Image (spheres, rainbow, N blue to C red):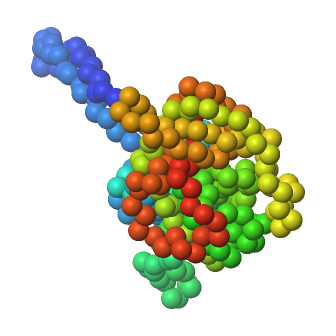
Amino acid sequence: WTEPHSRRLKIKLTIQKEVMASAVLQQSLVVEFAERNQQCPECQAAYAQGMWKSLVQVRQRVPHKRTFLHLEQLILKHGAHTDCLSLEAFRDGMDFYFAERNQAVRFCEFLSSVVPVTVKASKKLIGADIKSNIYNYKYNYMVEIIPLCKDDLVVLPRALARDAGDMAQLCVVQRVSNCVHVVDPQTCQLAEVSVTKYEQEPFRALLHTKRLVPFVVLSIEPRLAPERPSARKKGQSRKMRLAECVVARESDLGSNDQQFLCMTHLGHVLKTGDTVLGYDLTTSNLNDDLDELNRALPDVILVRK
């Protein structure tokens, strides 16, 4: 057991000693006991350095860790870290130490069920008893979160976009669960990118949320989504509405009259005069090769209100 502070106890003792048959010697003194913080032997063994058997390294290498911060809240909500011996934070992730291998495997399965991850396992021999045929290993699990976060602008590979119903390659990440949900802002078409599909056709974010620019909605009118024979019939959500929107940069108001006409999937929440965040592709320096896009590149892509 462990206590936050030490306790002190004073006891008054009386010592008697019979010197002779008819004489008794007495002396009184105060003894002070100090009780320090301590742990039981099981806790000492668990928290000792080198007592862990499994290590889970969770990493996400992106400029902003929105998906990783969301994962942290899910771990706290579901109590997935209760069996963890200790935690160690790094710049691009965290390390989780476990006493048993099955605890680390169960933790990796939880991560795979809430976020899109790739898991690589390895083990290291630290001791062996050849006579008894007993081997002692330490296991290491490298969990890599897909480097995509909510509201990122991505360019899907052509094969992946064709498999999703011939949708546009330029999409916005709508949300991230155990797979990546993307939406085409020009047609409101939805698609899901699983971990298996991502490993076959990997792609990265073209622009992230730090590049969002505030715009002001000047006018907005609802539009019907274009019907395409190759598009999936169930690829649109009722929570989105296609609209034609005229916007202007918030920083340009009062200085010039530059306006942009764009299609947006936020027609159900936007009104005239609202402020909306979006990507300004006219001023963005896109280093990636965008010549393979199956549709024209728009000037502005609105992301969220």
Identify which residue, 129 or 161, lies in the foreground. 161
Q: Position of residue 168 (x, y in %)?
A: 67, 63
Identify which residue, 287 or 227, lies in the foreground. 227
Q: Residue at x 50, y 77 (%)?
A: 123
- Residue 213 lies in what quarter of the image? top left
Identify which residue, 140 or 254, lies in the foreground. 254
In this view of the protein, can residue 99 be seen by the observer?
no
Position of 285 relative to 162 (above/below): above
Q: In the rendered picture of this protein, how many numbered marks are placed on residues?
A: 0
Residue sitting at the far bottom: 130
Q: Residue at x 35, y 59 (%)?
A: 49
Q: Residue at x 24, y 17 (%)?
A: 10
Q: Position of residue 93 (x, y in %)?
A: 42, 56
Q: Position of residue 288 (x, y in %)?
A: 46, 70
Q: Position of residue 143 (x, y in %)?
A: 52, 65
Identify which residue, 3 or 183, lies in the foreground. 183
Q: Is residue 7 left or right of residue 178?
A: left
- Residue 245 lies in what quarter of the image? top right
Q: Is residue 152 left or right of residue 61?
A: right
Q: Is residue 163 left or right of residue 218?
A: right
Q: Is residue 5 left or right of residue 65?
A: left
- Residue 34 lies in what quarter of the image? top left
Q: Residue at x 85, y 54 (%)?
A: 234
**Which quadrant of the figure contains the N terminus?**
top left
In this view of the protein, can residue 155 be seen by the observer?
yes
Position of 252 relative to 201 (above/below): above
**Which quadrant of the figure contains the C terminus?**
top right
